[in-house]
Each structure stands twice: as C-alpha cells, then as structure tokens.
Amino acid sequence: MHEEKSIPTIFDIAREAGVSRGTVDRVIHNRGRFSEDTASKVHSAIKKLGYSVNPNAAVLASRKKYSIACLIPDFKKGEYWELIQQGLRAGAAGARQYNVDVKIFPYDQTDIESFRRCCASILSEKPSGILMNAVFRDEVTKFSKVLDGARIPYAFIDNKVDGLGNFLYIGIDPYKSGQLGAFLLTARKAVESILLIRIIRDKGNQGDPNETRRRGFLDYFAKELPACTIHTVFINPNDTGSITAELESFFREHPHVRHIATTNSRIHLIAPYLEQHPDPERIVVGFDDTEKNLAALKAGQVEYLVTHRIHEQARLSIEMFADFLIRKIEPARRNHYVHLDILHRMNLDDYS
Amino acid sequence: MHEEKSIPTIFDIAREAGVSRGTVDRVIHNRGRFSEDTASKVHSAIKKLGYSVNPNAAVLASRKKYSIACLIPDFKKGEYWELIQQGLRAGAAGARQYNVDVKIFPYDQTDIESFRRCCASILSEKPSGILMNAVFRDEVTKFSKVLDGARIPYAFIDNKVDGLGNFLYIGIDPYKSGQLGAFLLTARKAVESILLIRIIRDKGNQGDPNETRRRGFLDYFAKELPACTIHTVFINPNDTGSITAELESFFREHPHVRHIATTNSRIHLIAPYLEQHPDPERIVVGFDDTEKNLAALKAGQVEYLVTHRIHEQARLSIEMFADFLIRKIEPARRNHYVHLDILHRMNLDDYS
DNA sequence: CTGAAAGCGCTAACAA
DNA sequence: TTGTTAGCGCTTTCAG
C-alpha cells in the first residue's frame, strides 16, 4: 500500500541507522573515522531501503578534481590515431561533468626521446591517472615501474605490454584480428597463393607494431591452408609513386595471385594500383576504418575491412578510467577486448 | 593572464546581465515572463562568458517528472524482443537519474485486441512520451493520430510505419539487411540454387513482419544472380519435430542445394537438422543474435548472422527520448538507422 | 515582468 | 568517532 516509492536519500539512511548524514557519507565512501558498529548499521539500512547515491548531487557537492593524462602517438590527418584522439575528446567532454580533466600528450612514434620527454612532463603534472599505448615496449615497462612506485594508476589503450600493473587494457585482440582477416581473404576457398603487403619500415629487426596480428594471420594459413603460397611485397609509404611500380612488377611475375591483404592500417596505399588494374575476381582485405581505407572500401577496391569502434573504444576508456578514479569501480574485465567489426561495402552506410 | 578559467555559473550571468538568477533561468529555458530587453542582455552575457548550464545541478534542482511508456511485444525467453526489453531496462536505469520513469506495456503480437488494450491503458496514464513498434500497422496508424491530437510525442523502435508524426525511428534498414544477407550467402559466387526457409504463419496474406527484409534479399538475387533458383520451404515453429522431416524431404529431392537462409530471426529452428546432416560445403545465413542463433553460429551450423546491437539500440532509444523530453534536443536524424553487424564464429567472442 | 529565497541530495570542513 | 553546517549550481515557488 505504499503510495510512492520515493527514492531514499542519504537522510533516510541516516535516520534509519540512527546516525548523522556525515557519518553515512563516511561509511559509504569508506573515508574512515567511523566504528565497525555504525558501519554495519548503515549498511543494513542501505540494503533495507535500497539506497544508492544520487550521482548528480554527489558530483555537484564534490569539488575534488581529477586529471587523466593521455600518452599517445601524434598523427597526421586521416591516420589511425586521429580517430583515437577524437574519441578521447568525446570522453573528455563527458568526464568534464565529473570534474575530471583529460589532457593529451602526443609523442612522435618514431622518436623514443620524444616519448621520454612526454613521460617526464606528465610526471611533473602529477595526474590522477595515465592512459597510454605501448609502442616503445621497453620504455613503457620502465615508465610503468615509476608509476607503480608513485601509486599512479595507468591503463593501456589499443596495445599493451603484458605483465605490468595496469588495471585496464582496452582494445582488440590483435591475434584474433589477424585470423579473421585471413579467413575473410579466403572464405573457405582453396586459395593457392596470396600477396601480403608490408611496410618497408617493418622489414628489419626493429619490430612491427602489428607483429601479433600478422602472426594470427599467418597461423591461420599454416593451419587451414598449408599449401597456400604467401608472397610478400614491401612498400614505402613515403614514396607512393614507387608503390604502383612495385606492384606492377610483382604481378607481372605472378599474374595468378588474386588475394591481397595487409596487416597494418594502410591498405589504402595500394588503392591507386588497384584502381588502375581492375579485376572483378580479386579480393582485398585490410584493417581499420580510416578515412582513406573507407574510401577504398566504398570504391570497391577493398572487399573487407576488419576494424572496431575506434572512437567508441577511446571514449569508453576515458569513461572507465573516470569511474575508476571517482567511484573506485574496477573494470569488469582487466582485458577489455572490443568486438571486431567486419566492414563491407554492403554494410558501410550506417557505420560511424 | 587569467589564472583559472573557472566555469561560469548562472550567478555570473545574472551579475553580468544585471538581473537576478531567476530571470536568467527563465530566459535560458524560455519559460516566459521576461522582456525582450532582458532576454538579449542575458543572451549576450551567456555568449560573452561562454556559459552552459550544469546538468547535474539542473537535474538535482528540478522536480519535474517524466514518463516513457514502451509499447512492445511480449516474448518468451531467448526471443528477439527479450533483448530489446533488456536494453530498455538499461536505458531506464540511466534515465532514472533524470527523473524519467520508463514503463513497459507488453502486448501479444498475435492478438490485436491485446494491442488495443495496451494503447488504452497507456493513454489513461498520460505518459510524457511513447516508444513503440509497428507490428499492427493499421492499429498503430490510428493510435498515432490520437497521440498527435493529444500532443504526446512518440517514437518507433525496430520497425515503423512511414509517414506518421514520430520524431524518431531507431532500428535497422530492413531492406539493406536483406541485401547483406543475400550477399553473405553467395559471396560473389555463381550459386545455382538456394533454399529460403520461411515461417508457416507468414504464408497467407496476413503479411510477414519481415517483408521488407525479404524483398531486399530477393531483389539482390534478381539483380546479381538472376539465374539462381530460389526454393522455399515453410516450417512450423510450434512443431519442431516436423521441421527436420520437412527438410529431409526437401533435400532428398534437391541434394545439390547447399545455400540456406531465412529472413526472420529463427534460423536456429533448422539447427537440429543441420547437426544431423553435416556438410562442410554448406553455407547458412540467418538474422539476429538471439541466444539460440548464437549457439548455432558457435557450433558451426550457421556461417553468418546479420544482426545489430539490439540491446544498445533499445538503450539508446530511451536516452534519445529522454534528451528530447528534458532538453528538447531533437535527434540528429529522424531515421536513426543502426549499423548492421556481420557475425561469424571468428569474431563472435567479444560481441555482447 | 522581476527578485528573493527555499530547497534538490550530497560532500567536506569544522566542532565536539 | 560522531554531528553540524555551509555550500555545489540550478529550479521553482511566492511576493512584489
């Protein structure tokens, strides 16, 4: 016969437990300065009345400031990390309401010194937390030790170093993405040979940032299509003119290869060649929905793009970090693997 | 040389414009009872100081209540509409913070009278808005006229009747989903014949709720594979025992048909047959990631599932409706078509 | 048409 | 260890 199930407030809890509001606040947020006895009284009152804090009031009353420093690669327009940055900004806009400030520290992916400088300047700002990626693995590992010591929480986005003290990784499972790309390229057909496009930068022993993905890709062939020949062509992204020539020379020698893929995010680099040499039987698979890749997908030069909600992943990482900071809510999973989207020109229109 | 860009409050605007906070509030929210003159003073102060209302404080102070009535089909566990309901509940949890109450009115999809009863009881509760789907098209059209008259805003989720006064439709583009299903089934191969599974209920002239999707599916074949024969088998979902027999009889006659699809959400109904008659060459395509469909996908009986973030779509519909009610924010697009996901056992693990 | 003032539910400083 | 109290920024009466 309750007329109104009006939402209980902290005041109701205080009365039910026979203490003051201040005390209730302390036990709820575990701020210390209360006895075990009152704590249990408060907790049972909370349970009885089905209370939960009103986040609007909590935020309004709290003047505590938080800050998240984002240590991520700098980029040129249209590159992968631009999408991440946009997502981080969207997250920042949301987090702002909760007194959390998000600041981006971009470093040069090709310059380890610039990474070190960023680490130092972040440290000097004493942020509440740090979101970063792990291109420079050794450097990142070192930095993580410093953060562990300083008790500054940190999370990884997009890629990580296993075994560190991060409370969250958010990104794809790169190995699986490689496997999926390999599947889409061949789709259960007995393909005899494929061409894998690689970036010349990754040729030496410097290590390829997409090494795990490539391993997934190659393992799929080793297991499912062991007879398939895998050709490799290295291209130079900084000399686009040479790419077409490179490919023309390859295909003169191997005219029967009709399945092409790359395991980095730059399949668009070969779009000009594909456009000049159309072949309705060809299948091309790439990764990540950057602007130029999408254009190649739409134009029909690329058949499938394996990607994920890059923007959303970045936005979510800020949201989860803010929750962790403010409400001490640990992420449900420490490794938050995001879903891999299969993009084709038939399901492209409403992807954003 | 500003030390702190501390966020301006309504108080700052009041002072800048030389009026009281109450007046500022009235002009911001257009609640009337102010002169043109003060309004312009306030507006320029807002612009000058870069003010925007603090939503936390606004919600906290406002005691206005809103309610959204959801008029959607009832369901059995594991069915499509269960996912929608769960999403609506998630949205409700979020909206609760903004004083908006979400109430679900389930009706029986097979009983038009139950739909009418729901409409009546919704009307008697005078909700702030109504979210519904459009299984009974004529009935929905009639209801919409009543709502137009009563000035109660309404939105459609999952399917709609075009030309009504709804401010939002959120859901897939069914025609495109059919086309995508057809593409995945054949994947550019010259398939000679396929089997389309249909529900016996939809056989007569009662109209199939997935008619548009089926049209997209069939149009794809008409255009891309005009030589392909399309066989149809009607099955009875309420008599699962008969399904296997039905299919066995079909395949005795047509042993070469290896491509099977349905355009409704019940591809799982044929999973038992597929399991008993394995064929590594077979390709099966269905729609919607209900529990049972996912199981069939995982088990390898189904190759692709065309689906979308059903839960998220429902959650978002509540969020957008709440924004419309509280902040009078019109959705960016009146037809909010959601992305079509391609699900395969290779990208299944992190989809949720 | 406008201003003053009492809250909304919670936090945090201060007193006890 | 606990209670009291002054706000947080905004909405909403209620007088003028």
Image: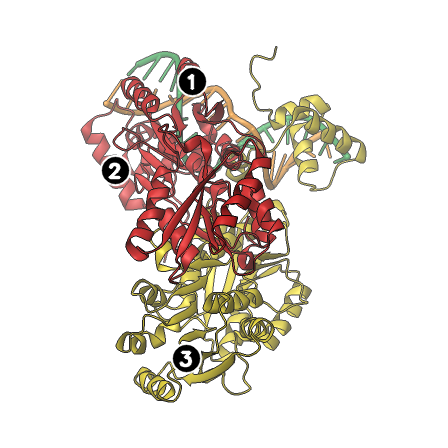
Chain colours: A yellow, B red, C orange, D green
Sort mark 3 into few (<14), some (14-19) or many (20+) by Cα contacts within 10 Å: some
Q: Quote the CA–CA distance across marks 2 and 1.
A: 40 Å
- The image quarter in which residue A176 lies: bottom right
Tell whether B194 sits left or right of B328. right
Q: Which residue is tagged 2? A: B43
Instruction: Say whether disc 2 or disc 1 marks the residue closer to the N-terminus.
Output: 2
**Toward the viewer: B60 or B233?**
B233
Q: Tell me the chain of label 3.
A: A
Tell whether B163 sits left or right of B104. left
Outermost residue toward the left in this view: B36
Residue B298 x/y as whole percent: 59, 53
In the rendered structure, are the residues bearing label 2 and label 3 in contact, judged by CB atoms less than 8 Å apart?
no
Outermost residue toward the right in this view: A37
Mark 2 residue element: helix
| Res. A2 in view | yes
Which residue appears at 31% of the width and 75% of the height?
A274
Which residue appears at 33% of the width and 57% of the height?
B225
Q: Amino acid at mark 2?
A: His
Q: Which residue is tagged 3? A: A257
Q: Quote the CA–CA distance across marks 1 and 3.
A: 63 Å
